[in-house]
Amino acid sequence: MDTPEQDEDAATAEPTLEGGYDPEEVETRWQQRWIDEEIYAYESDPERDPNTTYAIDTPPPTVSGSLHMGHLYGSTLQDFAARFQRMHDGDVLFPFGYDDNGIASERLTEEELDIRHQDYERREFQELCREVCEEYEGEFTEKMQNLGCSIDWNSTYKTIEPRVQRISQLSFLDLYENGREYRKKAPAIWCPDCETAISQVETEDDERHSHFNDIAFELVGETAPREEFVISTTRPELIPACVSVFVHPDDEENQDLVGETARIPIFGHEVPVIEDERVDMEKGSGVVMCCTFGDQNDIEWYQAHDLPLRVAIDESATMTDLAGDYEGLSTEDAREAIVEDLDAEGYLRDRWEITHAVGVHERCDTPVEYRVSKQWYVEILDHKEEYLEAGREMDWYPEKMFTRYKHWIEGLEWDWLISRQRDSGIPFPVWYCADCDTEIMAEKAELPVDPLSDEPPVDACPECGGEEFEPEEDVFDTWATSSLTPLINAGWDWDEERETFEMDKPELYPFDLRPQGHDIISFWLFHTVVKCYEHTGEVPFDATMINGHVLDENREKMSKSRGNVVEPDEVLSEYPVDAVRFWAASAAVGDDFPYQEKDLTAGEKLLRKLWNASKLVDTLAPRDPDEPETLESIDRWLLAELDDAVADLTAHLEEYEFAKARDRLRTFFWNTFCDDYLEIAKTREDSPSTQYALRTAHRTFLELWAPFLPHVSEEIWQAIYSDSGSQDGADLEETSIHTRDWPSPQGYEADLEAGETAMEVISALRRYKSENQLPLNADLESVAVYGPIEGFEEAVQNVMHVRELTVLEDEPEVTTEVASIDLDYSTLGPRFGSKVGDIDAGIESGEYEIDDDAGVLRVAGEELEDDLFEVELERSYSGEGEMIETESAVVILE
RNA sequence: GGGUUGGUGGUCUAGUCUGGUUAUGACACCUCCUUGACAUGGAGGAGGCCGGCAGUUCAAAUCUGCCCCAACCCA
């Protein structure tokens, strides 16, 4: 408790069932105490059995973004798993990370401080990033804590902190030593705004307006079959970079061009016409130019046909000297200028507007270019099969999500480009010999290092003896570090003495669960599998849980541009966190689902119901009654049903089926316990048997609700069941409901059929009262029941206020006639096949005969034994009173 | 353009893998009821033929094919 205000709150607010439930006060209070008393802290013990340690590898959210509904939803799902496992199976590590390493936080810092990174030294700028991020991290912490997640706030990390930098650089060195990394000059995707290479996953498609331009190319040479041909392009500014022209081998119309030489208009250089089946014949004239580089196809052609490199665009999307008069123009300006000049000289044959998808950098929406540059790559294409196998070894919740992972890997075409030409980020621990370019790696013991300010570990180049070294200026791709979270959490490090990698907390690895949204399977999950697998030889996760997206109330994606974003803050200021959690449990894991306010109301109602039912229980029975020698039928029935519910719930939660668990528990609690049993219990409060069952069930309900509704269940638990002697300096770890053992079935046996029938009878009597507009507590003179309700007679009688209840030995006097005949199609079908239609028709038209003596039904020339059909009788009661039929009983009211 | 997933009463959803004939529940709606917690409660009722078409089968929400719609991933 930091502030006087909170102090006062805590002092005046002891858990109590007085009055109504006040979630605002209760939730804040418990969140504070759980954190203050560290009841979710994970204490590592390397000797601990990994099987009883449940470790979650939570993907750290990007600090530069704000907390959105997706975070709220995802964290809540993780917390369901964490809280269940903590109660069920022992120790849980539920860590939290802040992802503040990378372009996102760099851009945030520039915006926040209105500065440019170019104006600062790398370390200086990084310092500023850290300062800016710190504020945002604080905000994140607070908001996450307001969600009531059982995160261990001692187990946090930032992806830019020195310890993590060290791990990230160690990872680089380890992969390098294992031959999994290489530095290569090759075409790479480039963002001209951020001025860095980026990887395939960082680009996205965007619909942009553009023009198609038909440009005439002349053929050179005396024997040319025609004077010119026309190509279509959206990027005329690239014609100075044109290195060839392609025609499809099946393109008969243009076959004559193959082998000829074309002259580029305005620029005048000459290029060959080559055939290649990658040409899209449907597009434009079917003749296409290849530039270095306009798109991925150009790169393939460049490599396949060993074409020369003509670089017309530099790293900032400015035209180079190769563009002649256009040098120094931006690509956009050059495009317009070149089109104008082409037109003036008669080469522009047509021009029309189009909209097409352009690859843009996801961080800044700038269309990307392809540039040849020297970059570091992690080799992944040669291990596709192993990564696929790793994916197969994991349990996927839901299973179907594995397909996305599989297809992603199958479609991989690039090795993983990990170098970025940025300032903020983790530096490569590498220098190069100024003479021979030999790569000099840092010593593991020295990490983390920054080559820009630190010295290389050698005085002379081991290859050529040179004494001058160039530091690597690049930094790692964010994902190169974010993909190490399991190793970060497990404390992976290089042991200098043993000369091997060791983990501080080896019992955590591999992690039990990796949760995340379905949109990041392809990079975050994939990259993490790659890195951890290469470092440890193991699949880092036993299971992965893929959550869907939160949509708006009309099932549309939330987006700022649509203005349909729902802020978690708004939701939490209006509804209890427990209600929000109840909503979060409503969707099957993996499904997208809409945010609907009425679902939160449902949660609120449940909290109220739980609260009020608890109050009632507390007035009906002493808090800790002894178990009687024998339980009466009705009480044993409840506890047997409870056993079933516990078993079902445990199974659901183990399979991450939160929605099923939630519905099962709600139905059992609300309908069976509150509506049926509690009403009966009111009439039996003096029974030790009922007192015991009431309390046992109530305690169990609180425990079962605890993972879903941690605040209200803790409040009620503390108010009633926790050791009241330990209020001051109470050890919350001992008394909290969240550190208790998960309930297990106690093996109660009861006549479930009788219980079920009794509930049917009660229901029938309620319906009778309702239909006759009687209050539910109205007295009924005399009721006779024919049906199996042994042991429940009194319960029925008391709860329905029946003066005289008789159980009939024999079926009441009724006249019966056949109402319908139900056939058992599942055995009938296979046996009679197409005859089933005739049988149906025969019954329909009444052309059948029931032979009671032989127990057979004769219809359509067939004889059906009695296990194949069931005769439904229409009873009409001719005696005194009114008869009501239920599924398995007949009730007569007089 | 390719792939994946989904399309069930007004809304959200269970059931679909393992085909069997009264399709689950909640919210909203209508009627009734103040019973020792809860009227922000309880009891009851109406409402769908399961995106469309075709097929397999004695039988399809459930299997197959095509089409339409939506979301996501990849071009």
Image: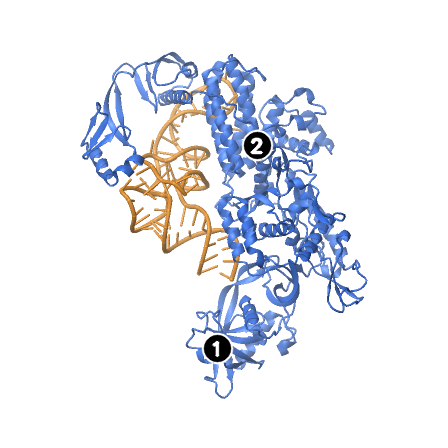
Do circles 2 and 1 both sit on a common chain?
A: yes
Question: Which chain is indicated by disc 2?
Answer: A
Q: Secondary structure at mark 1?
A: strand
Q: Position of residue A51 (x, y in %)?
A: 61, 36
Q: Is residue A444 visible?
A: yes
Q: Secondary structure at mark 2?
A: loop
Chain identity of mark 1: A
Q: Which residue in the rendered view is the most extreme toward the bottom?
A: A222
Q: Quadrant of residue A706?
A: top right
Q: Can you identify the residue that label 2 sits on? A: A709
- Number of marks present in the image shown: 2
Mark 2 → mark 1, Cα distance in angstroms: 69 Å
Quadrant of the image for the N terminus of chain A?
A: top right
Residue designated by label 1: A230
Question: Residue A271 sits in which quadrant?
Answer: bottom right
Residues A416 and A34: in front is A416
Direction from residue A830 to residue A132 in the image, left or right: right
Q: Relative to the observer, which residue lies in front, A488 or A2?
A: A488
| Amino acid under disc 1 | Val
Name the tint of chain B in the rendering: orange
Q: Earlier in the sequence, mark 2 or mark 1?
A: 1
Q: State which chain is coloured blue.
A: A
